[in-house]
Amino acid sequence: MGADVLDVLKARLAEDHLEILGGFACEDEEGLPPGTRSVLMLGPAEPGFWARLTAAPEWDGGPDPVDRWSRRVIGRIACDLRAKALFPFGGPPYRPFYQWALRTGRVWESPVRLLVHDNQGMMVSFRGALAFKQVIETPPVAERPCETCSKPCLTACPAGALGAAGYDVPACHAYLDQAAGNDCLTAGCLVRRACPVSAGYARLPEQSAYHMSRFHKAGRTA
Ligand code: SF4
Ligand code: SF4
């Protein structure tokens, strides 16, 4: 039964350029819908995701188009597969996506503490998760890429805002306000881009620029 659901799910996700980034088994766990036995975490699959999203009706100039698209698309898939859709936005309270990701065995804390995925590197992002009442085969665990890496993420930030000590968010925003910060704003965080695993994932600079502009705008108004 689990394998059938998984095949249907993968086909549905592929239509919308989403993919399973990892999953974990559980049993009657607090914070999850009653009876949940499996959680699968979903994120963009490039190439194709950004083009699909920006052609969708949610890309209408209104607020939070990515979240609205995720709610509609993942919500519909959940309904069709008798799963429950869970989202990393819409709080507080927020679902513990960071901790869930670590449980998949395919996502780890990087040396700068941001998450790193075995295929998507530091460009990993979650659009939602599906909670199933049946046991679903979860993707196999992988080897943490940082173990054999020269760790360029530790020194890539020109502002010294993101490194082994973590993320100095005000220092990052201060750098983005300068002309030198334009590269980060238009093509994405240099730390995330420095990761060799990120480099192998086809995320478009336009997507990174969109998220950077939202991050920086929120920082200015905080
Ligand atoms: S650059 Fe290397 S050490 Fe840093 S997150 Fe990527 S794989 Fe891990
Ligand atoms: S966006 Fe730029 S300034 Fe901010 S942490 Fe990343 S590399 Fe550093």
Image (tube, rainbow, N blue to C red):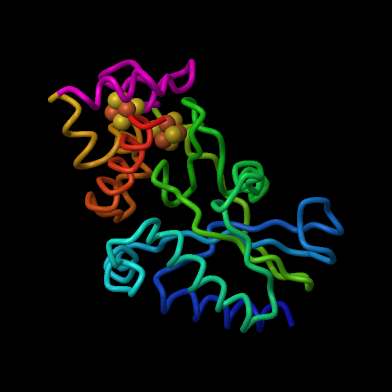
Q: Is residue 55 left or right of residue 70?
A: left
Residue at figure coordinates x 57%, y 49% from the top left: 106
Q: Is residue 128 magenta?
A: no
Residue at figure coordinates x 56%, y 39% from the top left: 108
The part of the chain drawn in magenta is 151-178
Q: Is residue 88 left or right of residue 176?
A: right
Where residue 99 sits in the image (x, y, percent)?
65, 42
Where residue 43 sits in the image (x, y, percent)?
47, 59
Where residue 204 sits in the image (x, y, percent)?
25, 54
Q: Is residue 201 left or right of residue 144?
A: left
Is any atom of residue 139 visible in this view? no
Q: Quadrant of the C terminus?
A: top left
Where residue 105 sits in the image (x, y, percent)?
63, 47
Is any atom of residue 175 visible in this view? yes
Q: Is residue 154 magenta?
A: yes
Q: Quadrant of residue 4?
A: bottom right
Ligand 2: image quarter: top left
Q: Quadrant of the N terminus?
A: bottom right
Q: Is 99 rendered above or below residue 133?
A: above
Q: Is residue 108 left or right of residue 173?
A: right
Nearer to us in this view, 17 or 68: 68
Nearer to us in this view, 183 or 200: 183
Q: Quadrant of residue 219?
A: top left
Nearer to us in this view, 121 or 210: 210
Residue at figure coordinates x 36%, y 69% from the top left: 58
Report how many numbered discs are placed on residues in the image: 0
Q: Is 129 rendered above or below residue 10?
A: above
Q: Is 169 rendered above or below residue 194?
A: above
Nearer to us in this view, 139 or 66: 66
Residue at figure coordinates x 44%, y 75% from the top left: 14
